[in-house]
């Protein structure tokens, strides 16, 4: 069966739920799975970003995590309030959650099973990095290489987000389409830190595409609970055997740079790339450096394994 170089979005059953996925690149190339972050649909891995990675010799697969985009929506879990966060931080009372990051890791492995992929290169951004770390800890045989971008170990000693980034995370969901578009632009301005005209010019079209695919504020709340209920992976990350690259921005306001440094320090032999002037985003001017680093790392891991 000859598969096309680009397969449009499809729904597949994995780990008992429906996941929406899309594939770019040669079907015989090394499989590379992109895992997105909190409340972010798979299209936040920009189409052109995926095409450029595919051009480096990968079969690039992006997908909507559970509770976002076109994937299954779950239920349960009230919106997180300040009182619950304070209890967690100061009284160490764990947050209740309908599911945890390990369940999302099992979604990832389930998707690989459904697609007939024995092992793949995993690239996760933010919460996606946490999910990729969980896969590398719990399902080491499925991971050819790990790239953790703007993520962290869950270590509570890592500095919290800046006040501005935290306020944006905890803000109530927008009530109207107009408010959503306004919030989208404002959010990414905060996360990108600084001026990125190429990205700013695309904010409206990116917001429209995200809105059209469907919003799920309750799902974002459950994903946040999953992160907070999963605790620290710092000790368990010592067991990771996959060749690991950690990429982090020097001015990240949401997952502070210490999060990336902590991840690299926890994983044996991990390489750390600090990207100067990068916030909590993948701005277009930084793609050559980021895509180049991912490709070099994954191909290097594949060569060593061969």
Image (tube, rainbow, N blue to C red):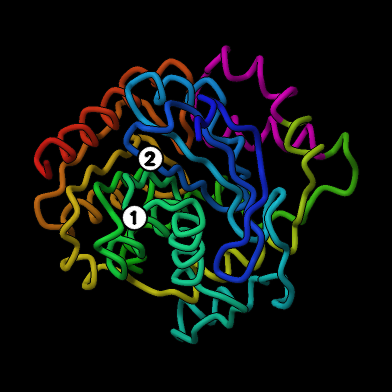
Indicate yes or no whether the magenta region holds residue 194: yes
Where is residue 59 shown, x and y percent of the image?
41, 33
Q: Give the left or right position of residue 249, taking residue 228 as reference.
A: left
Residue at image point 61% right, 71% down: 16
Where is residue 192 shown, x and y percent of the image?
51, 30
User: In front of the other: label 2 or label 1?
Assistant: 1
Residue 238 figure quarter: bottom left
Badge 1 crowding class, 10 Å Cα cut-off, few under 14, some 14 to 19, many 20 or more, is: few
Indicate yes or no whether the magenta region holds residue 156: no
**Vertical position of residue 91 compared to residue 278: above or below:** below
Nearer to me, 79 or 114: 114
Label total for image: 2
Name the residue that disc number 1 marks: 118
Nearer to me, 259 or 52: 52
Where is residue 217 shown, x and y percent of the image?
75, 57
SS label for mark 1 = loop
Badge 2 crowding class, 10 Å Cα cut-off, few under 14, some 14 to 19, many 20 or more, is: many
Residue at image point 55% right, 76% down: 86
Residue at image point 24% right, 36% down: 298
**Vertical position of residue 164 compared to residue 267: above or below:** above
- Main structural element of the magenta stretch: helix, strand or loop? helix
Residue 278 figure quarter: top left
Name the residue that disc number 2 marks: 32
Q: Give the left or right position of residue 145, taking residue 214 as reference.
A: left
Query: Disc 2 and disc 1: Cα gap in Å?
Result: 12 Å
Q: Give the left or right position of residue 116, taking residue 216 as reference.
A: left
Residue at image point 90% right, 43% down: 176
**Which region shows up in magenta?**
180-206
SS label for mark 2 = strand
Residue 49 is tagged as none
Give the mark nearer the N terminus: 2 vs 1. 2
């Amino acid at each position: 069966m000859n598969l096309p170089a680009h397969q449009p979005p499809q729904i597949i059953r994995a780990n008992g739920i429906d996941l929406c996925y899309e594939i770019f690149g040669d079907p015989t190339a090394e499989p590379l799975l992109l895992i997105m972050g909190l409340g972010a649909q798979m299209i936040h891995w920009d189409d052109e970003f995926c095409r450029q990675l595919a051009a480096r010799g990968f079969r690039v697969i992006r997908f909507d995590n559970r509770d976002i985009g076109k994937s299954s929506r779950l239920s349960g879990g009230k919106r997180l309030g300040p009182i619950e966060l304070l209890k967690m931080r100061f009284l160490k009372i764990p947050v209740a959650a309908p599911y945890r990051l390990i369940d999302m890791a099992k979604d990832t492995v389930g998707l690989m099973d459904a697609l007939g992929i024995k092992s793949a290169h995993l690239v996760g951004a933010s919460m996606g990095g946490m999910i990729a770390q969980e896969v590398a800890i719990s399902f080491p045989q499925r991971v050819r290489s790990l790239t953790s971008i703007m993520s962290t170990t869950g270590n509570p000693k890592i500095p919290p987000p800046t006040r501005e980034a935290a306020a944006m995370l905890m803000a109530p969901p927008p009530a109207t389409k107009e408010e959503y578009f306004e919030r989208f632009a404002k959010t990414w301005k905060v996360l990108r830190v600084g001026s990125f005209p190429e990205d700013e010019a695309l904010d409206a079209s990116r917001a429209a595409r995200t809105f059209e695919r469907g919003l799920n504020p309750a799902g974002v709340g459950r994903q946040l609970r999953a992160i907070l209920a999963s605790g620290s992976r710092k000790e368990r990350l010592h067991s990771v055997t996959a060749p690991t690259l950690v990429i982090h921005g020097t001015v990240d306001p949401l997952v502070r740079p210490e999060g990336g440094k902590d991840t690299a320090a926890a994983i044996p032999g991990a390489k750390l790339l600090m990207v100067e002037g990068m916030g909590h985003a993948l701005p277009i001017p930084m793609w050559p450096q980021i895509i180049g680093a991912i490709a070099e790392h994954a191909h290097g891991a594949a060569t060593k394994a061969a």
